[in-house]
Amino acid sequence: MAKYDDGFKRKVVEAYQNGEGGYRTLAQRFGISHFSLVRKWVKIVEARGFGALQRRRTKQHYTSQFKQNVLHYYLNSGDSYLDVALQYGLPSGDLLQSWHQKFLREGIEGLSPKQKGRPSMSKKKKQIQPKKPMTREQALEQENELLRAELAFIKKLRALGMDVPERLKNEMPESSTNSEVSSD
């Protein structure tokens, strides 16, 4: 449910166009939370008419390339979110702002459409491909890699002054300096 209906927005914009006050004055007179809403409505009506104030009934989908083009223009033009949104026919500057934030967080991948909902549960069982057995050398390399990771973890715990869990203490081999027996 929209906070302000279309008729109310129209009344406010018409009051502005009739010279009954500025953005702040009209916002106070009509009990609008912030004067920037009045400014936004006036700009939208000036650019696209009163029909643009109506809420859309269906959700609009935009391609990743379109989003990239709009963001590229925004970043290079120096115009406000609302001005760029009006130029490209977007419903509001807030949509462009959310695209910009996603782009900053996730990069171009953030602009691509995401799959909605849970994956379907198919009745077909996936056939598990038998894994090729590892060679002795590959198995040893994998084991070495796991041991190196475990050792790095233990060193990091000690460097932070934390206790090493008992399960790791029992499995830890002695260091090479301690295990050498001196033959004097």
Image (tube, rainbow, N blue to C red):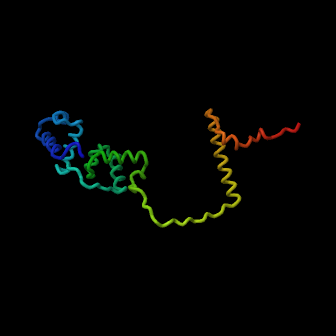
Residue 118 sits above or below residue 12 on the image: below
Residue at image location 66% in from the left, 46% down from the top: 148
Q: Where is residue 18 in the image (x, y as percent from the top left)?
A: 10, 40
Residue toward you, 97 or 122: 122
- Taking 69 as reference, is 20 left or right? left
Residue toward you, 69 or 40: 40
Count of number-bearing discs:
0
- Taking 167 as reference, is 68 left or right? left
Q: Position of residue 78 (x, y in %)?
A: 32, 43
Q: Where is residue 120 in the image (x, y as percent from the top left)?
A: 42, 61
Residue at image location 36% in from the left, 46% down from the top: 100
Residue at image location 11% in from the left, 38% down from the top: 19
Q: Where is residue 84 in the image (x, y as percent from the top left)?
A: 28, 47
- Taking 66 as reference, is 9 left or right? left
If the image is split into quadrants, where does the C terminus sit? top right
Residue 74 sits above or below residue 19 on the image: below
Residue extending furthest toward the front:
123
Q: Quadrant of residue 177?
A: top right
Q: Quadrant of residue 161?
A: top right
